[in-house]
Image (cartoon, rainbow, N blue to C red):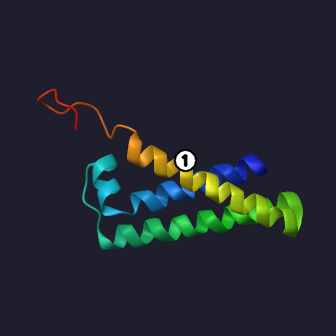
Amino acid sequence: MTALCLLLAVVAFVLFGLATDHHHQQRLGQRLTRGRKRHLRRLAWVGVGACLAAAFAAQGPVYGAVAGLGALSFGAGAVFLFLNLAPAGGPDTKGKPK
């Protein structure tokens, strides 16, 4: 359940990241519409809730809250570093990196 919580946290923050115009354009190569942004954010919040629910189910209310918040912090940090530091894509038609 702890691994599931970590996975849900990472997925939730990937969705939050892709709900921003810059990262969506950079990673997926297409413009972000209002409806898609709203949908991605809603799915991200569902992921946050599911992560906390998994942590509570695995470790109870006291330690589950601590583990859930820790997993969310890890997910936010890992996704932040990935989205901002990892190369965005392969070379374009001219052979230059994007």
Q: How many marks?
A: 1
Quadrant of the rendered image containing residue 24: bottom left
Left or right? Give the position of 71 relative to 2.
left
> Which residue is situated farthest in the top direction here?
95
Q: Position of residue 78 (x, y in %)?
A: 55, 47
Quadrant of the rendered image containing residue 18: bottom left
Task: Check disc 1: other Cα within 10 Å, few if <14, some if 14-19, many if 20+.
Answer: some
What residue sits right under mark 1 in the picture?
Answer: 78
Q: Residue at x 70, y 62 (%)?
A: 69
Quadrant of the rendered image containing residue 88: top left
Q: Secondary structure at mark 1?
A: helix
Amino acid type assigned to the residue bearing label 1 in the image:
Ala
> Which residue is situated farthest in the left direction here?
94
Left or right? Give the position of 79 relative to 98.
right
Left or right? Give the position of 92 relative to 36.
left
Q: Residue at x 47, y 69 (%)?
A: 41
Q: Position of residue 26 (x, y in %)?
A: 29, 49
Q: Position of residue 7 (x, y in %)?
A: 64, 49
Q: Residue at x 17, y 30 (%)?
A: 96
Left or right? Give the position of 92 relative to 23.
left
Give the vertical position of 49 relative to 11 (above or below): below
Give the vertical position of 65 relative to 24 (above or below): below
The C terminus - image quarter: top left
Give the vertical position of 28 relative to 47 (above or below): above
